[in-house]
Image (tube, grey):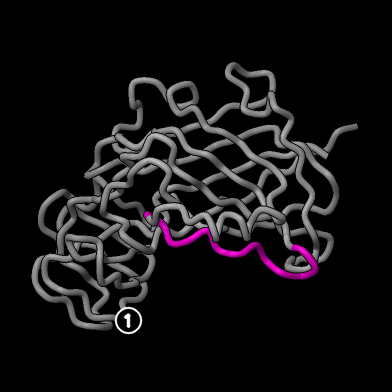
Amino acid sequence: MSKYYLTPEIKPQINKMGNVAYTADDVLFDWTAFEIPMGTCALKSFTAKVMGTEAVAANAIDMDLYFAKSINGSAPPTLGDANDAKNIIKTTAAKPYIIAYLGIDATELEDSEDGLVGYNILGAGIGGSPDPTSKTVILEGEPAYASTQGYQTVWVAGITTAGAQDFGTGCIVAGAHSADDLTIVIDGVDADDVFAIGDTLIAFDADGSDETTIGDVTAVAADLITVDAAPNIIADDDEICNLSPITFQFGFEY
């Protein structure tokens, strides 16, 4: 009898230039580890939540996903920062670690008519149409990095194919924000049109520079965000963004 495993939500971090539009063939996000039970398995379902731009679903754009494993206890080497152009030396160094590929045709896989308004859901499952597992994506990692007994670690990284993803929010800090202040006053786009409780936040200058980490959202209103930690000063007019504007869940069959 087949056994199935659904991963917890996987949250790649876009911690560089997160509010600046990508171009084609940029690094969408670098290697992000997740754990699955030991053994060879087949990818059977794919779901992604993709934040829009300034509360408008606009980023359901094709992407390439690459899966990798460790080799002799070493994690796959970096492909580069998010929003970086691909670098042939880095992609070549990662080649031995890559074990599978999944191309995402967002036009085919996205929810129709932007039904959730401010973000898209991409997904399909075995037997569905379209079916992202029709290429029979088979994965097997190594247990070296797994923190849970009986599990193995696999990595996923993304590359843009059409470009133009833009995860800017239009939520602008209204006045300089002191360190350790857990409430952030916002101008521009209403914060509760963009963020949900549990989102992890990061701030950028208008040009995507000077990234400043924040904490997780504990409450949100139109012009006020409350977080569980704000260890750094946030400059006036910085843009508050989601550290993980794309999240994934994968379902596997063993």
Which residue of the protein is positioned furthest toward the top in this rendering? 129
Residue 102 spot, x, y in % from top left: 61, 36
Q: Residues within 10 Å of mark 1 (few under 14, many from 20)?
A: some
Q: Quadrant of the C terminus?
A: top right
Q: Is residue 81 magenta?
A: yes
User: Could you say which quadrant of the image residue 32 lies in?
Assistant: bottom right
Q: Quadrant of the N terminus?
A: top right
Q: Is residue 57 above or below residue 127?
A: below
User: Could you say which quadrant of the image residue 146 lies in?
Assistant: bottom right
Point 32% across, 47% down: residue: 22
Q: Viewed as shown, does residue 160 lie left or right of 72?
A: left
Q: Does the magenta stretch include residue 78?
A: yes
Would you name the residue on which mark 1 appears?
Answer: 231
Magenta residues (range)? 71-83
Q: In this view, does 130 lie above or below 41?
A: above
Point 57% across, 55% down: residue: 91
Residue 233 spot, x, y in % from top left: 23, 80
Residue 142 spot, x, y in % from top left: 80, 60
Q: Which secondary structure type mostly characterizes the magenta part of the structure?
A: loop
Residue 47 spot, x, y in % from top left: 55, 37
